[in-house]
């Protein structure tokens, strides 16, 4: 393999890594990206210029709360819809066709049951990790577990003091399918409520055209949830047949 070809492969790999970092951590500055990837300012800008030309990322001006001092406003790089689509897993069309067939043959309720069964495996895997964490750290622990499965999730404080927390997912592997079948988002939201032991509310979704999926997590003090009192506070985490009544504390 020639040097030129070898360099070309390395450039593509590095550029793909830069794009994923923008997806997971964006909006983000070139300086922060360079620190994460270990590239010089000139090198990271070369990759960003290429991603801009390809329509994978876009520039956003500095957020008001982050501007300090004088000088040129900082540039923040964010993933575009086209960039996010590049990370979407294959077979979306097949999955959508299968769910359409299921809806036609068995009705919308069958689609909802399918969605709950799909999320049940994730819920079972997350349950021991989330429930082992102190209540005030469970949103962060859940975000870490989701990130391990490719959701690029993070926990953040609510917009108001004492207003709970937010669970933000920067990537959704099934966004294209969920745009047609919101039952997938609803099942996921119900699972979050059971895992965290408190009501949650989905504020935004990538499937509906938002930049990220944002879920508001109510404070445990408002939901009446205290420290663990034994048993399985996640409710029907291991139960595939979850009724609408059992998921009533989830607000969608």
Image (spheres, helix red, strand yellow):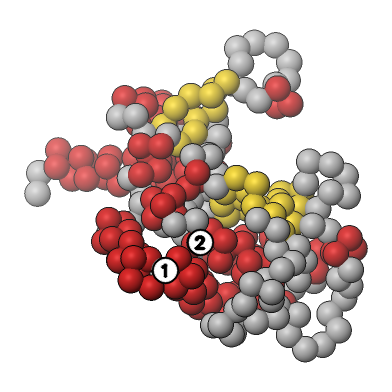
Seen in the picture, residue 134 relative to 78 is either above or below; the reply is below
Can residue 123 be seen in this snapshot? yes
In the image, taking residue 162 as reference, residue 128 lies left or right, namely left
Q: Nearer the viewer, mark 2 or mark 1?
A: 1
Please state the horizontal and vertical placement of residue 80, each as a whole percent of the image.
42, 34
Residue placed most toward the observer, 191 or 109? 109
Residue 107 numbered tag: 1
Q: Secondary structure at mark 1?
A: loop
Mark sitting earlier along the chain (2/1): 1
Q: Secondary structure at mark 2?
A: helix
Q: Which residue is mark 2?
A: 183
As drawn, which residue projects farthest toward the top? Answer: 71
Seen in the picture, residue 36 relative to 99 is either above or below; the reply is above
Residue placed most toward the observer, 117 or 66? 117
Please state the horizontal and vertical placement of residue 230, each as a whole percent of the image.
82, 87
Q: Quadrant of the C terminus?
A: bottom right
Asked whether the beta carbons under mark 2 and mark 1 sit within 8 Å of each other, the answer is no
Please state the horizontal and vertical placement of residue 46, each as a whole percent of the image.
36, 27
Residue name at image x 81 percent, y 53 percent:
164
């Amino acid at each position: 393999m020639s040097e030129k070809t070898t360099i070309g492969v390395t450039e593509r790999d590095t550029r793909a890594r830069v794009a994923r970092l923008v997806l997971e951590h964006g909006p983000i500055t070139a300086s922060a990206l360079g620190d994460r990837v270990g590239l010089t300012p000139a090198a990271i800008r070369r990759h960003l210029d290429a991603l801009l030309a390809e329509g994978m990322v876009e520039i956003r001006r500095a957020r008001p709360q982050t501007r300090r001092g004088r000088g040129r406003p900082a540039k923040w790089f964010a993933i575009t819809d086209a960039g996010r689509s590049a990370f979407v897993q294959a077979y979306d069309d097949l999955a959508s066709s299968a769910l359409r067939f299921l809806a036609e043959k068995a009705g919308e309720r069958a689609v909802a049951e399918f969605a709950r069964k799909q999320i049940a495996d994730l819920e079972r895997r997350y349950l021991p990790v989330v429930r082992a964490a102190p209540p005030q750290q469970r949103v962060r622990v859940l975000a870490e577990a989701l990130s391990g499965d490719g959701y690029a999730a993070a926990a953040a404080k609510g917009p108001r003091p004492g207003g709970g927390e937010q669970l933000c997912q920067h990537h959704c592997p099934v966004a294209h399918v969920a745009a047609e079948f919101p039952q997938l988002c609803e099942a996921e939201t119900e699972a979050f409520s059971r895992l965290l032991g408190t009501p949650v509310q989905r504020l935004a979704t990538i499937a509906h055209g938002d930049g990220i999926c944002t879920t508001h997590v109510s404070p445990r003090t408002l939901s009446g949830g205290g420290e663990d009192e034994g048993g399985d506070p996640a409710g029907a985490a291991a139960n595939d047949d979850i009724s609408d009544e059992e998921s009533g504390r989830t607000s969608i």
